[in-house]
Amino acid sequence: MQQIPVASLDPDRYAETFGVFVAHSLEYPQMLSELAAIVRDRCPDGFQLLDIGAGTGLMIRGLIEVCNKRPAHYTAFEPNARHARDLHATLARLGLPHEIHETPYSRDTRLDRTYDLVLFSHSLYWMPDPAAVMLQAADAVAPGGSVLAFIAGPYGVHAMFPLFEPRLRRTSPMLQNNAISSHELVIGLRARGVEPQVKMLPTPIDVSGLFEPSAAAELGEFISFCLQVEFSDLPLQLQDDIIGYVRGGCVPSNGRLYWYSPTAAVTVSGHSPER
Ligand SMILES: C[S@@+](CC[C@H](N)C(=O)[O-])C[C@H]1O[C@@H](n2cnc3c(N)ncnc32)[C@H](O)[C@@H]1O
């Protein structure tokens, strides 16, 4: 099979297409209610929160809106300059004591605090070994605390990769590896002797109107985010195949069109005794 040379999205285009994807995703309310339940049940008053891959601050902003228990201190790692700008603005508005590291978090990162909760909200795709990074973060968690990861389930976007990735020859690395899902994360955790709690959230993506000719550019941005390439650079036949795949997995309901794409909430305890 002849492979098509393609560049993966760069950080700016990543940030732009992320905005389009998020505008269609209905997952955030469900993720926030899961996060709020963990904060209420497991975090002490005045808890310390570490948000790794905080993006524009959607999760901390949403948490403050839906949960009356606020962190006493919030730390974030966010290396994308564009997102970090928005994150600074979000935190300034929230008036929460915080520190923002505009650097990538890795297994070599040393933290100077302990945390009650570490959150990876859709950020583990960026880590070379997501399970190892998640467990390394667990070392920074106080006894009784948790590490919570939201990560795509092995459906929808993830399932596109075995179908379409073999057609591509990437000329630059994929920044966000959407071929990683909760399935691979759980296998990696078990390989290290840790059994996580996994809850699949029934989170659809609202793609109503996206297949209309007038929305072609927006659909292109949406699919660019999914596959982390410029969709418009792909040959037309491949574009048609990809659109057909996404459209075929959609279900109409109450006048809307939904792509079923569950997100997993994967939790491990801090200082896991099995390790
Ligand atoms: C899909 S976004 C999710 C943003 C946010 N947590 C949310 O749920 O809306 C993933 C974020 O992880 C950030 N990221 C990538 N590599 C990272 C690393 N090594 N450490 C910390 N953040 C990272 C990216 O810049 C991006 O903003």
Image (cartoon, rainbow, N blue to C red):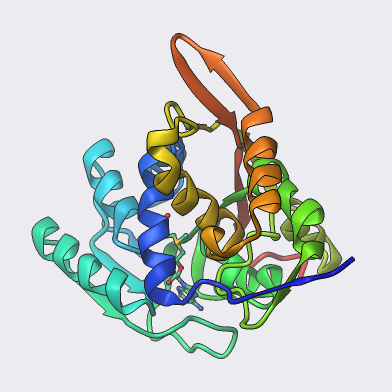
Q: Nearer the viewer, residue 117 or 27?
A: 27
In the figure, is residue 74 to the left or right of 209? left
* Image x and y of residue 29, in percent: 38, 35
Which residue is situated farthest in the front direction here? 236
Q: Looking at the rendering, in which quadrant would you find the C terminus?
A: bottom right
Q: In the image, what residue occupies the spot 62% across and 80% down?
A: 173
> Which quarter of the image is occupied by the N terminus?
bottom right
Direction from residue 106 to residue 239 in the image, left or right:
right
Residue 22: in sight, yes or no? yes
Residue 192: horizontal and vertical position, in percent?
A: 81, 69
Left or right side of 122 for 101: left
Residue drawn at point x = 67 percent, y = 36 percent: 244
Whether residue 196 can be seen here: no
Residue occupying the far right of the picture:
1
- Say which of 144 and 236 sits in front: 236
Q: Nearer the viewer, residue 81 or 2?
A: 2
Q: Quadrant of residue 138?
A: bottom right
Locate ligand 1 by image quadrant. Answer: bottom left
* Residue 57, above or below 209: below
Residue 73: x percent and y percent? 25, 66
> x and y percent of residue 72 in the render?
23, 61
Picture residue at 22% right of the left edge, 40% below the top: 65
Query: Is 256 displayed left or right of 44 in the figure?
Result: right
- Callout count: 0
